[in-house]
């Protein structure tokens, strides 16, 4: 599993201008079964995505395709972790 932490590198107005494209990108990753949860950080200086996958390079490729990243309004920090304990609904992702 992976935690993708987004940090905005541009004014929030530029982020908001790309929000619809970002949401479309998110929806595609949810439909593909890659993303499990996502949302804004509080305070609003970025966001967090919880992703499932075995291949870090593939997760990095997905993150690079985010309109926020492609348009230079955020930076990604990707952390891989081994889910050894989960809530019952996330049991398929436990290792």
Image (spheres, grey):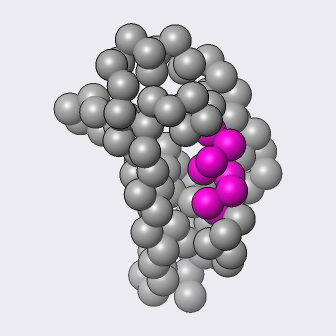
Residue 53 shows in the view:
no
The percent position of residue 71, horizontal first and vertical second, equals 57, 29
The percent position of residue 2, horizontal first and vertical second, equals 51, 67
Q: Residue at x 33, y 19 (%)?
A: 11
State the image quarter where residue 67 is shown.
top right
Quadrant that contains the N terminus? bottom right
Residue 6 shows in the view:
yes
> Which SS does the magenta portion mostly show?
helix
The relative height of residue 67 versus residue 91 in the rendered view (above or below) is: above
The percent position of residue 16, horizontal first and vertical second, equals 46, 15
Q: Residue at x 75, y 39 (%)?
A: 28
Q: Is residue 86 magenta?
A: no
State the image quarter where residue 42 is shown.
top left
The percent position of residue 15, horizontal first and vertical second, equals 45, 21
Residue extending furthest left? 43
Q: Is residue 26 left or right of residue 41?
A: right
Q: Is residue 10 left or right of residue 50?
A: left
Quadrant that contains the C terminus? bottom right
Q: Residue at x 30, y 38 (%)?
A: 41
Residue extending furthest front? 72
The relative height of residue 27 versus residue 89 in the rendered view (above or below) is: above
The relative height of residue 14 versus residue 53 in the rendered view (above or below) is: above
Counting every numbered tag in the picture gives 0
- Identify which residue, 41 or 70, lies in the foreground: 70
Q: Which residues are magenta?
A: 59-66
Residue extending furthest right? 32
Q: Is residue 62 magenta?
A: yes
Q: Residue at x 45, y 51 (%)?
A: 76
Q: Is residue 62 left or right of residue 83?
A: right
């Amino acid at each position: 599993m992976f935690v993708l932490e987004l940090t905005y590198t541009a004014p929030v107005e530029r982020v908001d201008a790309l929000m619809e494209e970002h949401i479309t990108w998110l929806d595609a990753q949810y439909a593909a079964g890659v993303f499990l949860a996502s949302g804004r950080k509080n305070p609003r200086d970025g966001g967090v995505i919880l992703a499932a996958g075995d291949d870090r390079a593939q997760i990095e490729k997905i993150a690079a395709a985010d309109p926020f990243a492609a348009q230079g309004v955020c930076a990604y920090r990707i952390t891989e972790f081994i889910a050894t304990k989960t809530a019952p609904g996330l049991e398929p992702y436990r290792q």
